[in-house]
Image (tube, rainbow, N blue to C red):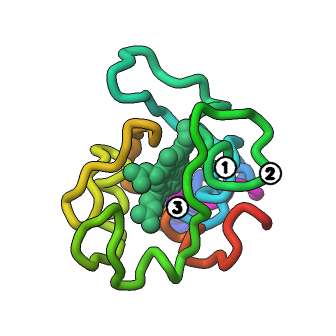
Amino acid sequence: MLLGVMLGVLSLSWLLQAEAAPASAPAPGSAVTGRSMFFGDGPLQAAIVGHPEALPPRLAACANCHTDAAGVKAASFGPRLDGSRMTEMRGRRGGPPSAFTLTSFCQMLRTGVDPASILITRQMPRYTLDDNQCLGLWRYLMETNDVGSN
Ligand code: HEC
């Protein structure tokens, strides 16, 4: 009897919790959250090297520099990104052949150091990201052939 009551209370509180979470919220670390960060709909914290203040979120969006259809004219445009080219062994920025992995991708976003230990230009902002944000961006890029167009 007591057990039945306890189970009842437990399942009720579980139901209430499930109720509280919006059903449409995408899972942290998913390609869907990555896509929304890429286009500036999700939060992204970034700064340009040498500037102490954070970039306005609209400018921090990857799409501003990595798509042709940039809504905001950024200081400098980055290369078109493509998941399969990122994971291909090839020379980048005059360095020895290298390929991105999740770990080296996150390192580059945070520090600017690429998989061949070469520093990318300061035109690419440095990001303050947690592991899930980074994973979401990575999954979005890996699942998308023509990044930015969809
Ligand atoms: C203000 C412009 C700008 C923004 C915003 C920006 N980038 Fe970049 N990005 C660049 C530039 C410029 C380069 C090329 C740097 C170089 O080659 O030294 C670059 C390079 C890269 C590269 C390296 C590509 C390669 O093959 O080596 C990746 C990956 C990348 N960016 C991902 C992102 C992601 C993900 C975001 C958003 C979280 C982002 N960038 C936001 C400008 C930007």
Residue identified by numbered label 1: 63
Q: Is residue 45 above or below residue 148?
A: above
How far apart are the alpha carbons under marks 2 and 1? Answer: 8 Å
Q: Nearer the viewer, residue 133 or 74?
A: 74
SS for dot 2? loop
Indicate which disc, 3 or 1, sits on the residue closer to the N terminus. 1
Q: Which residues are magenta?
A: 23-29
Q: Are marks 2 and 1 in contact (CB under 8 Å)?
A: yes
How far apart are the alpha carbons under marks 3 and 1? Answer: 15 Å
Q: Residues within 10 Å of mark 3 (few under 14, many from 20)?
A: many
Indicate which disc, 3 or 2, sits on the residue closer to the N terminus. 2
Q: Residues within 10 Å of mark 1 (few under 14, many from 20)?
A: many
Q: Residue at x 33, y 21 (%)?
A: 50
Q: Is residue 74 above or below residue 68?
A: above
Q: Amino acid at mark 3?
A: Gly
Q: Residue at x 53, y 57 (%)?
A: 28
Residue 51 part of the magenta-drawn span: no
Q: Which mark is residue 122?
A: none
Relative placement, left or right, of 102 versus 3 is left
SS for dot 3? helix
Residue identified by numbered label 3: 136
**Residue 42's spot in the image, x, y percent?**
64, 42
Residue identified by numbered label 2: 69
Indicate which disc, 2 or 1, sits on the residue closer to the N terminus. 1
Q: Amino acid at mark 2?
A: Ala
Q: Amino acid at mark 1?
A: Ala
